[in-house]
Image (cartoon, rainbow, N blue to C red):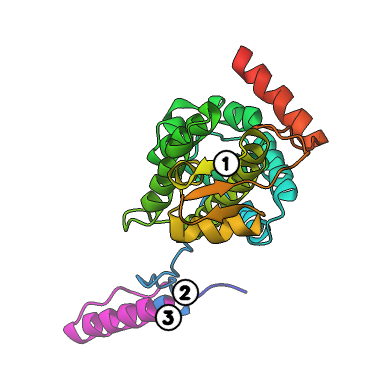
Amino acid sequence: MANGPPTPPPTTDVEIQDEARMSDASALAAEGSSDPAPETTSDAAPQPPPSPPIQLQDPYQLIFPRIAELSSQKRWIELIDIAEVTEINASNDQQLSRLFVIVPLILAYLIQNDLPIAKLVLERLPNDIRMSPLISNLGSLTKAYSAGAYEQIYSKANALVNMVAQPEFQQPELAQVINTMVECFLSSFRDRTFLLLSTAYTSMTLSLAEMYFGLGADELLPVAARHGWAYDTPTKVLKPMPTNETASFFAPAASSLANFNFIAQSVSLLEM
């Protein structure tokens, strides 16, 4: 089929205007048929905050409630075993939170009359912990006990209790444990002193007994009576009850596997 003759270009004003209108309509139609561009919005979904780094739990503070419980129940051997295992397994022994374990451990050894191990625990501490006020006071008490300095034992024990009672000491739970254990230490120390003096003296003045026991007459006389001591009021002389029981100032406490491991590790650290 033959094509018709070509359409002549517009020549009149009317034809030119018709041609322009047709071109605009074609452009609009083509524009409408195309896909609209995706709209961008400034309200993008907020990104979640980065996850905080995983904090390792402090083994000393984790075990402290159990230590406090054993202290209130006066179960010293169990307290020592738990504290020793924590000491051995903890990876960071530079933390001041270590005081939550090390202070009850030393006091438990003193209560058990196991002075050599108590001193060894103090010696193996790093300098920054050893120089802390709390350890310094506890070290002074241990030193007085080691020297058998009766008057100093009582004054250093009181200094330790007074220190943790100050407002600047901000660990009330630890202060409560220290108060309980210092009281138990003094009680056990006085019991041993009664036994020792009963083997060494047949009589002693009230003033000398007050020095040995760190108590005034009003407190001392009832305690002495419970131990079987007689008191002569006119002469102010106490007479211990004779005993055949052998006594010594320091008696070895019962050992345990944890004790052995702890001592072995302590010696190895001291030799490094």
Q: Earlier in the sequence, mark 2 or mark 1?
A: 2
Rendered-image quadrant of the N terminus? bottom right
Query: Does residue 111 sit above or below 2 in this rendering?
Result: above
Kind of residue at badge 2: Ser
Q: Are marks 2 and 1 in contact (CB under 8 Å)?
A: no
Q: Nearer the viewer, residue 29 or 168?
A: 168
- Residue 55 in view in this figure: no
Q: Are marks 3 and 2 in contact (CB under 8 Å)?
A: yes
Q: Please identify the residue farthest to the right as the structure is shown.
A: 257
Relative to the observer, which residue lies in front, 114 or 68?
Answer: 114
**Residue lying farthest top?**
271
Which residue position holds label 3? 32
Tell me, yes or no, whether the highlighted magenta stretch contains residue 18: yes
Q: Which residue is mark 1?
A: 203
Q: Which residue is rendered at x = 71% and y = 43% of the image?
A: 242
Which quarter shows the C terminus? Answer: top right
Residue 121 drawn above or below residue 159? above
